[in-house]
Image: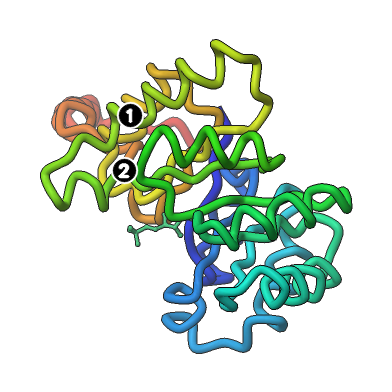
Amino acid sequence: MKFFVDTAEIDAIAELNELGMVDGVTTNPSLIMKSGRDILEVTKEICDLVSGPVSAEVVATEADAMIAEGRKLAEIAENIAVKVPLTWDGLKACKVLSGEGRMVNVTLCFSANQALLAAKAGASFISPFIGRLDDVNLDGLQLIEDIRSIYDNYGFETEILAASIRTVNHITECAKIGADVITAPPAVIKAMASHPLTDKGLATFMADWAKTGQKIL
Ligand code: E4P
């Protein structure tokens, strides 16, 4: 399973990247806004840091303008994946940009039928949003399972990029289902290392070690 980090914060990406935890990065207009950075500049810095796919999202809503923006974003670096929304115009832009050999990440996917259309339009990645479905009392993980079955039934090569991940449990479940990629905020990826029994066990070991009066170094 590949780990993408869902942020435009350079320091956070660099910290995880040093540990080999970053196979790619996803950004969106809200994350760019939070970073307070210029989209072209910060995306270039991310692409210089990370060799895997870096998603940069178009903000136009009509196909021709999305295509023009996508081409401009793709000029930033070879590892750019142009992110387009799952609208009819977004699918048109996906078809054209993927036909030009560019990676395309179709985002804001909330149904299996939308995922089916994105695969047929040549998407490299489909981004189903788990957390936002859970927010409205729908089952985000069920959507990942449904898309996995459909893509496997027909041999679609579009990678399932599970997005809007809010908890470590989302990541475990995506791994069990067989999502190709998860994209999660840095804090959620780091939280995967935590377990209360690890903390408790370590505290006991440290206390017992202190009683021995020994040192290793
Ligand atoms: C994915 O590409 C999106 O940037 C992201 O996962 C959205 O997550 P959110 O629903 O927590 O904003």
Camera-nearest residue between 125 and 76: 125
Determine the residue positioned at 88% across, 53% down.
Answer: 100
Q: Which circle, 2 or 1, is nearer the viewer?
A: 2
- Please, which residue is most extreme toward the top here? 153
Tell me the quadrant of the picture where the N terminus can be found: top right
Residue type at mark 1?
A: Gln
Look at the picture and state if 29 lies above or below 163.
below
How packed is label 1: few (under 14 Cα within 10 Å), some, or many (20 or more)?
few
Q: Which mark is residue 130?
A: 2
Residue 56 place in picture, x, y as percent:
63, 66
What residue appears at the point 43 percent right and 55 percent down from the top-left corner?
108
Q: Position of residue 64 (x, y in %)?
A: 72, 73
Say if disc 1 is inside 8 Å of ligand 1. Answer: no
Residue 156, compared with residue 59, is above or below; it is above
On the rendered structure, is 74 left or right of 197? right
> Can you identify the residue that label 1 sits on?
214
Quarter-of-image position of residue 82: bottom right
**In the rendering, at what x and y percent does residue 146 appear?**
38, 23
- Camera-side residue of 169 and 158: 158
Q: Name the foreground residue: 117 vs 142.
A: 117
Looking at the image, in which quadrant does ligand 1 appear?
bottom left
